[in-house]
Structures are given as structure tokens and as C-alpha cells.
Amino acid sequence: MYASEKFTNFRWIAKILATYSPCTLTSADLASETLDLELAEIGQFTELANTTLSIEFILKNIHVLSGKDYPLEGYDILRESELISDFTGKVAHLHGFVAWRPKTKQLIVSTSGTRTALQALYDLRAFMHRHPSKRGGVHQGFWKLYKGVRPFILEGLRKGFLEHEEVSELVVTGHSMGGAVSYLLSLDLLSTPDVVPNIPIKLVVFGAPRPGDQKLAKYWQEVVRDFRKRNNDDRFFQEYSVKAYNDGVPALPPLSLGFRHFTQEPLYFVHGKLYCVPASESEHTLFHVEDDNASGPPEHPRGGHNYYNKRDQEKTIRRMDWLDETLGKGPTDKWEELYNKKWNRNTT
């Protein structure tokens, strides 16, 4: 599995910049199985945004694509979903989409993580830009990427709410840089009540870097508190920021440059299990774990940036990108035959 890796998993960043918390996580810190399952389901939408393949094509063919030995094997939640909007931002071609999940009555907006060298250049623009709230600084590159997709996201959300009046929850999700963009979007939604209908919002991000400075993190916490108070319900806004073992991205940009995470209570994914992290340890990237209930060796023992939710995201994206490239060369009606010839008979 690891020998075939082509994507950067940022384990080297974890070795250089990530700090271990002095707090050891135990079985008492395990997240509930219900939450673990819920985040893994939302993670299917998160990971889907990272592909270059048309979301419309994917959902149209999802019953095949999610079958055994196909690239989205196990992504069964996508079978019940409907595409609202598939978009590419004005800056660095950042990809995302809005989807409707009828079973849970959720409208979901998912933004891709870094996929191109141009997008990586924006990741490296770790300069402070004054946030429009005037309450702190935001990562310049993330801010430009967010502004490039913001109008398309809002258009997709408006369309989704118009077509589905029964929406009961808005989910905002992203992996890596897409997680930082999801935070900036959520800050807009929470602080500007008239942008979308007043419904519960759930933010779910995986492997997100730090999006702004300490002042902006404080402003985020005030906005979250006010939003919950305004609706007399702490669960009207739910925030889940997941870090993973050996993933160095949450250690970026470094604390020494003034950057901070917004979340006060992150989650930590290690060896297939999800743990709740104390608020006092929110800036740490790595944690020691004492697990008295380990059942055999972990599936992805080395961890890394592309191994959340018990899935090998690189394997999925690699096969989806190959399929996208192949479809661009010929008729789409023969894609199953071509895929089987390439992968199912010579699996990686």
C-alpha cells in the first residue's frame, strides 16, 4: 500500500513541526460510535470533492462506481445523494460541489483540498491578510481561494434551498486546504444571518491547517457562541475538526508565524479510532494513546494526510483521476470495460 504512494502525506512535516501533547488519550476519550460513523459518512462527500472527475458523472454511475473493486467501493452513502451544483472557483481552479442528501435532509457543500501546483502556491502564501471583520488576520492564500469559490457556493446553496424546502441541516465540509476554506465559509454564514435560512449548521473538516491568527480565532469563538445563543441551542452549530496520526498539515502554518486553529475541541483519528481532545491541547498535532482494547494491527499503521475515516483516499483519487483522463480520450459508454481492464485484473 505505502509503496504505491504518489501523493504527499506530510509525515515529514509531522516529524519537523508537529508537537506531541503531554496529555495521553485513553479509552475514556473515545468518541461515540455514532459520531464516528456520522463523520465517516460525511467524509464520503469530503473526499469526493478532491477528484477531477465530473460529480454529475459520478452520481449518475454511483451504483457501479461504489461496487466491489471499483474506485468508490464502500461509498454507499453517495448512492442516495443528488447533485445541486458542481463548480470550479475563479482562483487556482479550486473545485467543490453542493449536494442534497434526502435521507437525512442535509444540504452539503464540499470543497477540495490541494490538488495542483498552482493551489499549493496559494497554500504557501502564509502572510496575514486583514479579515473583513477587522477582528484579526487570515491566511492570505486561503482567503483568496475562498473568495474565488464563495459566489459559486452561495449560488449552489440558494439553488439547494429553493429546490428543497425541507432542508433540516447545512453541512460544510473539506479536507486539508478545503478544511480551511470551509472554516472561512462557516465564519461568513454564522456572522451574516441573511445569507442562508436560519437552520442548524454542521462543520466537518479533516486534516485542516490553521486558517488565521489568535484574534480571528477568538472572533470565531464569539461568533459561534452568539449564533448558538441566538437560537437557544448549543447544537444549532456543531463543529468537528479531525486531525490524524502522522498528518503534518494541522501543524501548518507554524505557531511561530502567529497562526492558530479556530476549534477549541478537535478530534484525533489514530489506528482506526476517533478520540476527543481536551480544549487545552487544541494546538497540538500528535497525541500518545493508551488503548486497552486494541484488536489486532491497524489497517493504516503509518497514518498520514490521506488516511482518514479508515479509507485509503489516495487509492481512490488515483483511480478516479485515471478514469477522468481515460474518459477524455474516448466514448464514455465503454468506461466500465476500460476500468476493469486496467484495475480489476491488475489491482494495485
Image (cartoon, rainbow, N blue to C red):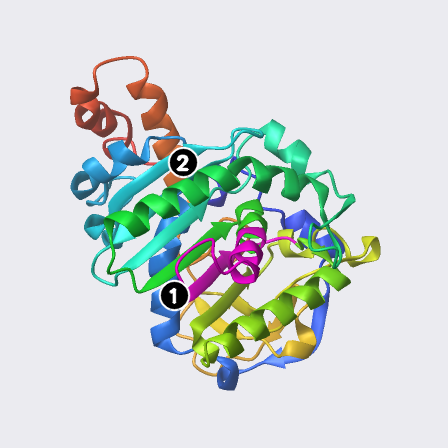
**Badges 1 and 2: C-beta atoms under 8 Å apart?**
no
Q: Which mark is residue 162?
A: none
Segment tinted magenta in the rendering: 184-209
Magenta region includes residue 99: no
Residue 121 is left or right of residue 95, and the answer is: right
Image vertical order of residue 221 relative to residue 2, above or below:
below
x, y (%) of residue 177?
58, 46
x, y (%) of residue 165?
25, 57
Q: Amino acid at mark 1?
A: Ile
Q: Amino acid at mark 2?
A: Thr
Q: Earlier in the sequence, mark 1 or mark 2?
A: 2
Please name the residue shown 49% across and 48% down the image.
306
Please name the residue shown 32% across and 44% down the image.
159
Q: Is residue 314 visible?
A: no
Q: Quadrant of the N terminus?
A: top left
Q: Is residue 137 visible?
A: yes
> For this rendering, which residue is in front, 126 or 105?
105
Residue extending farthest to the bottom is 28
Image vertical order of residue 195 relative to residue 280, above or below:
above
Mark 1 secondary-structure assignment = loop
The crowd level at tag 1 (other Cα within 10 Å; few <14, some 14-19, many 20+) is few
Please name the residue shown 34% across and 75% down the image.
34
Residue extending farthest to the front is 194
The crowd level at tag 2 (other Cα within 10 Å; few <14, some 14-19, many 20+) is many
Question: In front: mark 1 or mark 2?
Answer: 1
x, y (%) of residue 92?
57, 29
- The residue labelled by disc 1 is 199
Q: Quadrant of the C terminus?
A: top left
Please tell me how many numbered marks the rendered image carries.
2
- The residue labelled by disc 2 is 51
Magenta region includes residue 207: yes
